[in-house]
Amino acid sequence: MAFSAIFTQKSFTCFSSFPHTLRRTNPLLSPSVRMVRAAAEPEAAAAKTEAAESGGSAAAAKPKKPVYSMKKGQIVRVDKEKYLNSVNYLSVGHPPYYKGLDYIYEDRGEVLDLRIFDTGEYALVAWVGIPTAPAWLPTDMLIMSESLKYERM
């Protein structure tokens, strides 16, 4: 896939009527433009052909699925002691013994999604019946519940 293009003043007929005395003689502002392939591209093309010849072994090596500590749809609640001592609580700036977050300790939340970030495994938890947005919480501060004590809406 080599690509090269050369444009000169003679290529464009609309510029031919201008006198040649108005042209700049600075070599940095040369009227010709040349595009060439980067030096790394032939190496990448060679690697692609080698992979194709070897039977596609690079395509067969898929990344492994991560193993999560819980499942989507699982019912959880937050461990109060771990949450109050976490960076998540301290970053919000609530006063000590703030009562507005009691629903995360008492009510049951449902795990909507699980992800592994650089800082660890996190779960997206939503609380049914509470008009609030879901929150990403570390899975080590979640307590798994076996029973569902509320009716789904």
Image (spheres, rainbow, N blue to C red):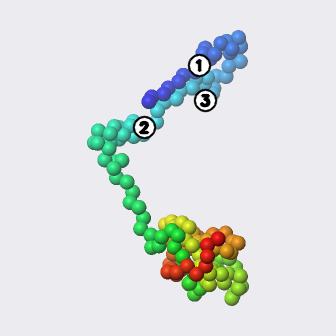
Disc 3 packing (10 Å; few <14; some 14–19; many ≥20): few
Q: Residue at the location (57% across, 73% down)?
A: 110
The residue singled out by tag 3 in the image is 28
Q: Nearer the viewer, residue 43 or 114?
A: 114
**Cα–Cα gap, marks 2 and 3:** 26 Å
Disc number for residue 128: none
**Which of the labelled discs sits on residue 8, or is there none?**
1
Task: List x then y, in percent, for residue 79.
Answer: 56, 84
Q: Measured along the vertical axis of the image, is residue 63 above or below residue 92?
A: above
Residue 150: x and y, percent?
A: 61, 79
Residue under label 2, please give it. 41
- Residue 10 versus residue 98 in the image, above or below: above
Quarter of the image with the C terminus is bottom right
Q: What residue appears at the point 55 percent right and 79 percent down from the top-left corner?
A: 148
Label 2 to label 1: alpha-carbon separation: 27 Å
- Marks 3 and 1 in Cβ contact (< 8 Å): no
Element marked by disc 2: helix
Tell us which disc is closer to us: 2 or 3. 2
- The answer to whether residue 146 is visible is yes
Of the 4 image quadrants, the one containing the N terminus is top left
Q: Quadrant of residue 93?
A: bottom right
- The alpha-carbon separation of the residues under discs 3 and 1 comes to 14 Å
Residue furthest left in the image: 54
